[in-house]
Image: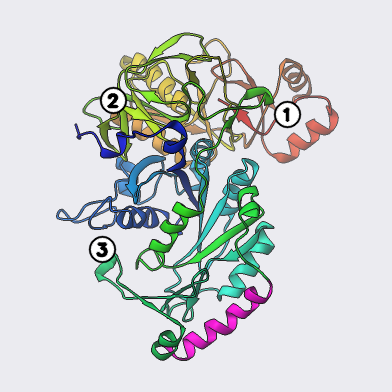
Amino acid sequence: MAQASPVTAGAGSIAEEAARRRTFAIISHPDAGKTTLTEKLLLYGGQIAEAGAVHAKRNRKASTSDFMEIERKRGISVSSTVLRFEHREVVFNLLDTPGHRDFSEDTLRVLAAADAAVMLLDAAKGVEPQTLRLFEVARARGIPLLTFVNKYDRPGLEPLEMLDHIETVLQITPVASTWPVGIPGDFRGVVDRNTGVFHRFTRTAGGATEASEELLDAAAAHEREGDAWDVAQEELELPDHAGADFDAEGFASGRTTPVFFGSAVSNFGVGLLLEALETLAPSPRPQPVAGGDGARALDAPFSSLVFKVQANMDPRHRDRVAFMRVCSGVFERGMRATNARTGKPFALAYAHEVFGDERAVLDTAYPGDVVGVVNAADLRVGDTLYVGDAVEFPEIPTLAPEHFVTVRNRDTSRHKQFHRGIEQLAEEGVVHVLRRDPVADPNPVLAGVGPLQFEVAVDRLEREFGVTVGVDPARWTVARRTDAEGEAAIRRSGAGDVLYRRDGTPLAVFVDEWWLERFARDNPDVTLDRLLTR
């Protein structure tokens, strides 16, 4: 086991310790460079000495954010991870989100624990469908966004064109915090609009180490870059004259987003983004409680929200880790808290600071920190733990599934392992597990946002539980949460079917949107909710 991190030894008051926390997520479309940017933030934060790809050579450190075997094989992120590091007295909790659309639900859970997010855009493609979907989730949760335009060392949109694109598509005001010098594909560096200083970058071999920078004033920059500098200055006149400067209130309310240009793979602009996360991203705030009855003060007794459960991160131990974000007070290893869902006490004896799949014993944590509770069999996604006055935080929403398969156990001698594995995957939120009969169903239905979720579920059932399964596509493509009245109406109409979640909640499922719309039109008073809860 790793040694305890120096980050754990906070000695200030709750307010002081909370003020130096920055808990943020990175959201993007697949292939925008999220894993690379995550790795480079760790490099510039001093957490790793050398950056490498997921398939790193033996003598180079691999990316710690992709730790599942299927992630390494496919080269994509399919599970969120927590990466905690300290840089210049600031404690960063980087919540790495899945990069694939099929795992949007995991991103939803992560955003419930984040205070800010970095929206990563491809310089050539701008706002892509998955980015838009995650942006809407972040906006609905009131999460401030910083935007990083990546891959500017390749051909892409001009900076003014990119800003106009962001504003048009997202209906948010982009404010350039840095400005590129050189056209896309011929990237020389960036101007820091706050200081006017030109950060001239030099490539490093494979982007493995921090890029060296020259800091030049305007005269020196003009001498070194000539026409490229002059063009950048002309372009900057437009946002300068328009008064498009950083607005703290607009950023906090989600009306504006500071924009940074760079290239994560070449380490261009990453250091300036990390500085912005330190200075602009908000520290933890009082968390709203369920029912709209105010918020839990930061200095109130300990409380936390469980936003993720992951089993078998370390196959050698076959354990189960619940990730909880500290919302108030001080976490101390060994303390006892109450689970608001069950009303029962829970001992927090085995707690870790988590860095990808690595762990270190964690003795103390403050608001904004993420704690990994080991062997947390009684904890579920969305649980609130508290000490002192009772509190419960709002449930974490999940997306209505769009893909369905029936799963069959091919080895009847592994009956118990099959059902134990299915239940565990449901508790973690890997897939929704639905049944045609609310009491028992030998062949449950797996439901998800995308088919890759089923691939992960099948892979984990085989590797972790020794179960071989078969999956058969189901005909439904639309699901909505309903109630007893809606259940009866669907059965009468024959427009759809009814499946049941583990807690007995009925879901109305339809072959396509046309049948859903027809049923909704004929039954306007029936409950049909798009967002579910766990």
Residue 156 as seen in the image, left or right of residue 506? left
In which quadrant of the rendered image does the C terminus lie? top right
Per the image, the residue denoted by label 3 is: 208
The outermost residue toward the left is 59
Disc 1: CA contacts within 10 A as few (<14), some (14-19) or many (>=20): some
Q: Which residues are magenta?
A: 225-242
Tag shown at residue 466: 2
Residue 149 as seen in the image, left or right of residue 70? right
Per the image, the residue denoted by label 1 is: 528
- Which numbered disc flags the more N-terminal residue, 1 or 2? 2
- Looking at the rendered structure, the secondary structure element under dot 3 is loop
- Looking at the rendered structure, the secondary structure element under dot 1 is loop
Identify residue type, mark 1. Answer: Leu
- Which numbered disc flags the more N-terminal residue, 3 or 2? 3
Between the residue at mark 3 and the residue at mark 2, the CA separation in whole angstroms equals: 39 Å
* Residue drawn at x 59%, y 38% as measured from the top left: 402
In this orientation, which residue lies closer to the viewer: 528 or 323?
Answer: 323
Between the residue at mark 1 and the residue at mark 2, the CA separation in whole angstroms equals: 38 Å
